[in-house]
Image: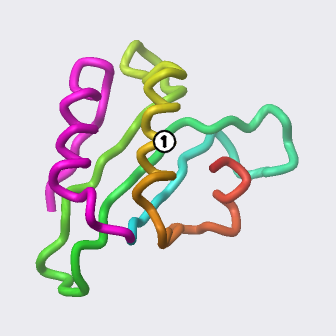
Amino acid sequence: MDSLIVNTDNFKDTLSSLKDNYGDVNTWIIDVETNGLDVYNPDIKLCGIGLTPVTNHNAQDVAPIYYFPVRHEGDTNLETPYVNQLIQFLNDTCHIVIGYNIKFGYEYI
C-alpha cells in the first residue's frame, strides 16, 4: 500500500490523478487528524485529512492513502483554497464515507 503526503507542489497533480483514477469510486475512507481529543474545546483544530478510495473488498488490493496536511508545523500545509478544492472533490465524488473513528472526527469534517 502506497501513501502520499499532499502539499502545494503536488496538490494539482494529485487531485487530477484522484479524479482520473478514482472519479467513479463512490466509497471512500476518511480520517481526520486534530491537535487534541476534546471535541468541545475550541482550541482543538483540524490538522489534516487522510483519504483513500475503496476500490474493492480485497484486502490485498488497496488503493494509495493520501494525506492532506492543513495545520502542521512547517511549510507543507495546504492553504484554504486547496482545502476548498479537496472538499468540492469529496462532495462531488464521495457518496458513501467510511469514517475512521468517526464519532470523534465528524465534528471536524
Looking at the image, which residue is at 28% across and 38% down? 15
Of residue 98 and residue 74, the one placed in the foreground of this image is 98
Residue at (27%, 55%) from the top-left corner? 65
| Residue 29 in picture, x, y percent from top left | 41, 66
Q: What quarter of the picture does the N terminus occupy? A: bottom left
Q: Quadrant of residue 89?
A: top left
Question: In the rendering, at what x and y percent does residue 103 appear?
Answer: 69, 68
Q: Nearer the viewer, residue 23 or 59?
A: 23
Q: Residue furthest bottom?
A: 57
Question: Which residue shows up at 17% across the image and 49% down it?
Answer: 20
* x then y, percent, for residue 8: 32, 19
> In the rendered structure, which segment of residues is drawn in magenta?
1-26
Res. 68 image quadrant: top left
Crowd band around label 1 with a 10 angstrom C-alpha radius: few (<14), some (14–19), many (20+): few
Q: Position of residue 24 (x, y in %)?
A: 26, 64
The residue singled out by tag 1 in the image is 88
Relative depth, front residue between 99 and 17: 17
Number of residue marks: 1
Image vertical order of residue 72 relative to residue 17, above or below: above
In this view, which residue lies farthest toward the top? 75
Q: Is residue 102 left or right of residue 26?
A: right
Q: Is-magenta flag for residue 51?
A: no
**Is residue 20 depicted above or below 86 in this figure?**
below
For the residue marked with disc 1, what is the amino acid? Gln
82 sits to left or right of 21: right
Picture quarter containing residue 60?
Answer: bottom left
Give the color scheme: rainbow, by chain, secondary structure or one colour: rainbow
Q: At numbered mark 1, what does the secondary structure look like: helix, strand or loop?
A: helix
Q: Residue at x 68, y 44 (%)?
A: 36
The answer to if 10 sits in the magenta stretch is yes
